[in-house]
Amino acid sequence: MQSIELSGLLVQPIADRVRGWTQTGKLDEDDLERALSTEARAIVDHSIALTDWAPLRDVEGLIGLAAEQIGGETGLVEWADEIVGDWLMETSIDTLMTGAREIVDGPGYVVSQASELILRESRWRYDGGRNGFSVRLCGLAGASPALKALLGSTLARLAAVADAREIDVRFDGIDGDELVVFGELERGDSTLAESRLHRAALIP
């Protein structure tokens, strides 16, 4: 089974928050020593490039500390808005969002393609079209509910931002083997054209 690795795109915001809590005294050296591997501690101290990868065992230490400080899974979900706001200034995400806004099922496209920027060798299944979508991310059985909550909420937020229409985007499966991000138009506004290029991109 392929081990889970996550990119700096998701890992760095967590490490930045942990560093900030340490600097303000909310966390101390004992907290870091208890929760973090040597590699995770290095990320906190020195950062990780957005395109580099960190193994799950290191990321789980960071997300565990964040969950303790921010209010568990509910707090992590609320934090997604801030993370996605910063992502929108990154070139890779900006390019992805620009392309998505030109196609009718752009929100599903964003989820599938953004997952590949976040999860190394991401495996996903797509279903949907003009009025709704579902993207099922596979192979996440080893990830904690907290990590899946943050991943699901950030992807859902990206999908919602990708479409000017009113779309209800949610996620499910934080206690299962797969994480599902899904959405449905709240009104029947289907004004964008189908894209065969997009259809090709949605074949994993």
Image (cartoon, helix red, strand yellow):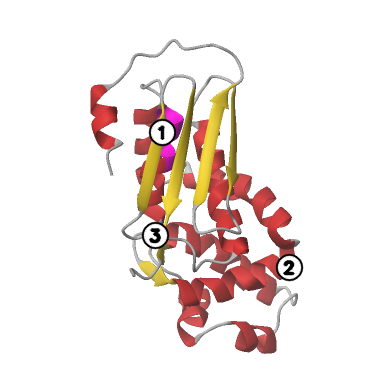
Residue topped by disc 3: 50
Q: Residues within 10 Å of mark 2 (few under 14, many from 20)?
A: some
Q: Nearer the viewer, residue 83 or 76?
A: 76
Q: Nearer the viewer, mark 3 or mark 1?
A: 1
Q: Position of residue 96 (x, y in %)?
A: 36, 37
Magenta range is 106-111
Residue placed at 46% from the left, 31% from the top? 107
The answer to whether residue 177 shows anywhere in this view is yes
Q: Is residue 41 left or right of residue 124?
A: right
Residue topped by disc 1: 127
Q: Nearer the viewer, residue 37 or 148?
A: 148
Q: Residues within 10 Å of mark 3 (few under 14, many from 20)?
A: some
Residue placed at 34% from the left, 65% from the top? 52
Three-letter amino acid code at the position of disc 1: Asp
Give the SS element for disc 1: strand
Q: Disc 3 to disc 1, how far (Cα)? A: 29 Å
Q: Is residue 146 left or right of residue 130?
A: right
Q: Nearer the viewer, mark 1 or mark 2?
A: 1
Q: Position of residue 149 (x, y in %)?
A: 60, 55
Residue placed at 56% from the left, 58% from the top? 176
Quadrant housing residue 69: bottom right
Three-letter amino acid code at the position of disc 2: Gln
Looking at the rendering, in which quadrant would you find the C terminus?
A: top left
Residue topped by disc 2: 69
Q: Nearer the viewer, residue 178 or 80?
A: 178
Furthest toward the front, the residue is 176
Q: Is residue 50 left or right of residue 142?
A: left
Give the SS element for disc 2: helix
Q: Disc 1 to disc 2, how far (Cα)? A: 36 Å
The secondary structure that most of the magenta stretch takes on is helix
Residue placed at 43% from the left, 19% from the top? 130
